[in-house]
Image (cartoon, helix red, strand yellow):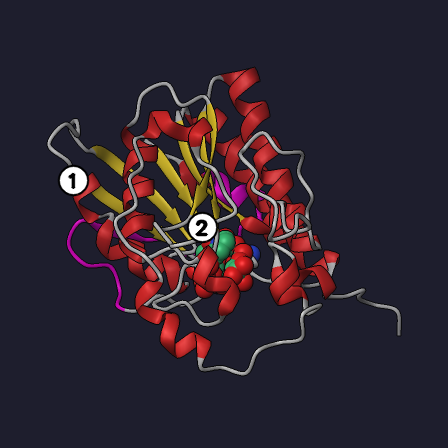
Amino acid sequence: MTQSTPTPFNRILLTGAAGGLGKVLRETLRPYANVLRLSDIADMAPAAGPHEEVQRCDLADKAAVHQLVEGVDAIVHFGGVSTEHSFEDILGPNICGTFHIYEAARRHGVKRVIFASSNHVIGFYRQDETIDASAVKRPDSYYGLSKSYGEDLASFYFDRYGIETVSIRIGSSFPEAQNRRMLDTWLSYDDLTQLIERGLFTPNVGHTVVYGVSNNANTWWDNRLANHLGYAPQDSSEPFRAKVEAQPMPAADDPLLVYQGGAFVASGPFGDQ
Ligand code: NAI
Ligand code: 15L
């Protein structure tokens, strides 16, 4: 926590707590609340520790989400389907689920949400284009569409009800950059944590969209419209470059090298059989 950080929240809800990023945030968000309420549809290990509560919940279940949000001061919403699937598979967890989160936030008076959006909201931009948060959205998948809708919910619930959100268009947040595209999109776990901290504690964010990317040598994303967050990434994908560049070079027209969303632009269609 930075020195200027005010008193932590009493109770923060983390959805998707059993997932790859959820497991990391379970550790790193601990200083920011007296109690972390952890939720997922999947089993969570280990069970609740000190200053933790575990509440299993299917985001598609409206009543369950309303119970989940009761007594919470802020929501870090990372749960849902995290890769491309059919629209039907994405509808419940991501589209209905994020709607349920915002409706529950309204009913229970939650004023701050951090939304795990994705670069796949703008995945059809090419890698030779640089965009900021004002660029027209170009979702690359049903998954990207669901994140785009999540950002629209964030915008609506701020304009209509004053609930503030920081939507993080996360690039690729894994322990290492795994391929050439990820050299440009990689977000370290420490930089992700810093973004969430800035998202929770910066006053008057309205609905802010920020690209979740580390200080990599090259990027396609300009975060000047989110300068008020004071996000200053500390890590870079350079240490992974040699290993990544030892991989065979994909064809020049491979989506991995052409589009910001990489392979997602070529997924589907689903359900034609
Ligand atoms: P993950 O797939 O490991 O975690 C997602 C979690 O959501 C899982 O534990 C899953 O059980 C849970 N979940 C799925 N359906 C659910 C439902 N109906 N109800 C409740 N929980 C449900 O994904 P990861 O990598 O941890 O990502 C976390 C969030 O960040 C996701 O929303 C993802 O879309 C977003 N994101 C992640 C990126 C990354 O590079 N890791 C990049 C861009 C966005
Ligand atoms: C995402 O949105 C996914 O959740 C993650 O699994 C990666 O595919 C990431 O984008 C990416 O674009 O690398």
- The residue depicted at 54 percent of the width and 30 percent of the height is 154
Which numbered circle lies on residue 258?
Answer: none
Say whether residue 120 is visible.
yes
Vertical comparison of 166 with 191: above or below: above
Vertical comparison of 133 with 17: above or below: above
**Amino acid found under the numbered disc labelled 1:** Met
Q: Quadrant of residue 195?
A: top left
Q: Position of residue 55 (x, y in %)?
A: 37, 53
Which numbered circle lies on residue 1?
Answer: 1
Does any atom of ligand 1 lie closer than 8 Å to the CB of label 2? yes
Q: Quadrant of residue 42?
A: bottom left
Q: Secondary structure at mark 1?
A: loop
Read off the residue under disc 2.
78
Viewed as shown, does residue 143 lie left or right of 229? right
The stretch in magenta equals: 46-66
Residue 57 inside the magenta-drawn segment: yes
